[in-house]
Image: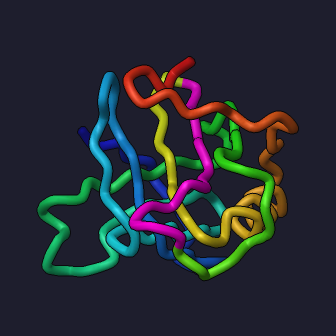
Amino acid sequence: MRRDANLDEEVLDASFVGGMRYGYIGGVNWTYPMVTLDIYKSGLELRSTFPFLRFLVPVWRARYDEISTVHWLGRPTPDSSAVIGLTIVRGVRLATTDGSYVIFWCHQRNQVLDALARHGLKIEAERKRFIFLNPDL
């Protein structure tokens, strides 16, 4: 699966490293640090952090006017680079007007949300509960 959008700007505003969940029922997870979220003036892009893995990790792009909702996932804790266990349990869920969605798992969730809000995206006040088999709920 691949979602593309034409991002006119090449000027990078912010960049974060994390993981990604993409796809429907069950989806596919790419763990930290396999995915980079790049935030541009006109939109955002999730892509492989490592060039040698680009054939495995899809590119997901969206312009800001295509994003319908932004939810935060996980506990309301401060950002931290400390890893507890093997998973990151904080993230950002982005849904587009065409029904596509992606989850960006990261240590800097609050910084990501702040960067998205600076670009005019409304962050939903209530956190979204992640349901493994049906994350659309």
Residue 73's quadrant in the figure?
Answer: top right
Residue at horizontal 59 percent and vertical 42 percent from the top: 93
Q: Is residue 48 left or right of residue 100?
A: left
- Against 67, residue 92 (above or below) is below
Residue at horizontal 63 percent and vertical 59 percent from the top: 42
Q: Is residue 118 left or right of residue 86?
A: right
Residue 126's quadrant in the figure?
Answer: top right
- Against 86, residue 20 (above or below) is above
Q: Quadrant of the C terminus?
A: top right
Range shown magenta: 84-97
Q: Position of residue 82 (x, y in %)?
A: 59, 80
Residue found at the very far front of the displayed protein: 85
Residue at horizontal 44 percent and vertical 71 percent from the top: 36
Q: Position of residue 127 (x, y in %)?
A: 75, 37
Q: Is residue 7 left or right of residue 64?
A: left
The residue closer to the viewer here, 20 or 5, is 20
Asked if residue 91 is among those painted magenta in the image, a careful observer would answer: yes
The residue closer to the viewer here, 120 or 22, is 22
